Amino acid sequence: MAIVAPAQPVSHPRWRWLQGFWRHTLFSLNPRRSRRLAVLTVGLMLVIGVLDYLLGFEVSMIAFYCLPVILGTAALGWLFGSFVAVASVALWLAGDLLAGAHYSNWVVPWWNGLLALSTYLVIVWLFATVRGLQIEMQQRVRQRTAALTAEITERERLEKILLGISERERANIGRELHDDLGQHLTGTAFAGQVLGEKLQALGLDEQRDAWKIVELLEVGIEKTRHLAKGLMLEEIQRDGLVDALRELAHDISDQFRVVCEFQQEGECHVAESSSALHLLRIAQEAARNAVQHGRAHHIIIKLTCRDAGHELTVQDDGTGLPVNEGRGTGLGLRIMSHRAQIIGGDFLIKPLPEGGTLVRCRLPQAHPVS
């Protein structure tokens, strides 16, 4: 199921520049940018003061001083913003007085100045609060991102350790089957063969039963050998993935009495053994699933190597994935998908239109087969 990101609110193009200025300039913690904003604040305040003087006292510029107040608060915090607010009020009153403003009472300019200063200080407090919340939110996001990154890294490390333990246990079981059970079955078959020869020398009819037991033991020895061989793949030597996949196709054909062929396209070079082993395990699991669950009769294991990356596909002509529930929900698929994720691959399983199933693991060149 694809994950769809939530729709973002679409802003009008005329206001995009203001949103970018608000997000990237006003809330920036870069010291160099803060100094630039401080210089810009003082310069803007002086420009507004000159314009206020030139336009005369009849045209009020009091609202325009809000911009340097906001910039000052964004540059160096509420203390510098308060200083800009006081300086703006003083500059505004001085400009009106120099422009020839006359008041009926000396209390009037002081009252107007206090009202303007109170308004600016409220703006400073509100903007400083918003700026503090923004900074706190950014810090929390960074902390949670760092914690999540560390958790993901630790999880990946533990997953690799667990898979390594799993491979070692598989190899140990394979050695036990080969060295212990295999030798035991071989000894038993030899004893049965000796018994059959004795019964044959005596001319007894029971010799047929003895040879049947020997035949069954030889089949058991062969199955044990195949099982041990599949479990003992601890590592693949350099550039041995192609040979391992070709041998896997032969073993699948011989063990399950189906047609399993291997195809290669391009020159495939393996850098390390761990990723090659994961690819081999994916092919092994996909081929066995095709026979055991999909009842396939023809399986194609293909390894394609190009400059863009490597691609392993396992295609069969079996019953395919059911409509509502497929093998994709099983443990085998989750293991294959997890192996692909560990080596940085893209894993896909899907039913084919003509029937059967396609399993694909694609490795980009940025994550070479290793």
Image (cartoon, helix red, strand yellow):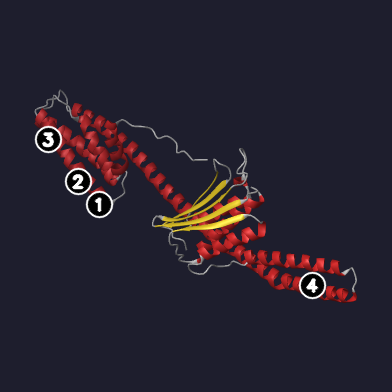
* Secondary structure type for disc 1: helix
Task: Compute the Cα span from label 3 to label 4.
Answer: 109 Å
Taking the image as shown, residue 30 lies to the left or right of residue 237, namely left
Task: Compute the Cα span from label 3 to label 1.
Answer: 27 Å
Residue at mark 3: 50
Taking the image as shown, residue 273 lies to the left or right of residue 188, namely left
Amino acid residing under circle 2? Val
* Secondary structure type for disc 3: helix
Mark 3 and mark 2 lie on one chain; the one further toward the N terminus is 2
Residue at mark 2: 39
Residue at mark 4: 188
Mark 4 and mark 1 lie on one chain; the one further toward the N terminus is 1
Mark 2 and mark 1 lie on one chain; the one further toward the N terminus is 1
Amino acid residing under circle 1? Arg
Q: Nearer the viewer, mark 4 or mark 1?
A: 4
Using the image, determine if residue 33 lies above or below residue 1. below
Q: Out of 63 and 85, give the one closest to the viewer.
A: 63
Taking the image as shown, residue 7 lies to the left or right of residue 217, namely left
Q: Which mark is residue 215?
A: none
Mark 2 and mark 4 lie on one chain; the one further toward the N terminus is 2
Task: Compute the Cα span from label 2 to label 1.
Answer: 11 Å
Q: Is residue 85 visible?
A: no
Residue at position x 55%, y 68% in the image: 235
Question: Callout 2 environment at 10 Å: few (<14), some (14 to 19), or many (20+)?
Answer: some
Amino acid residing under circle 4? Thr
Pointer 3 with pointer 4, Cβ within 8 A = no
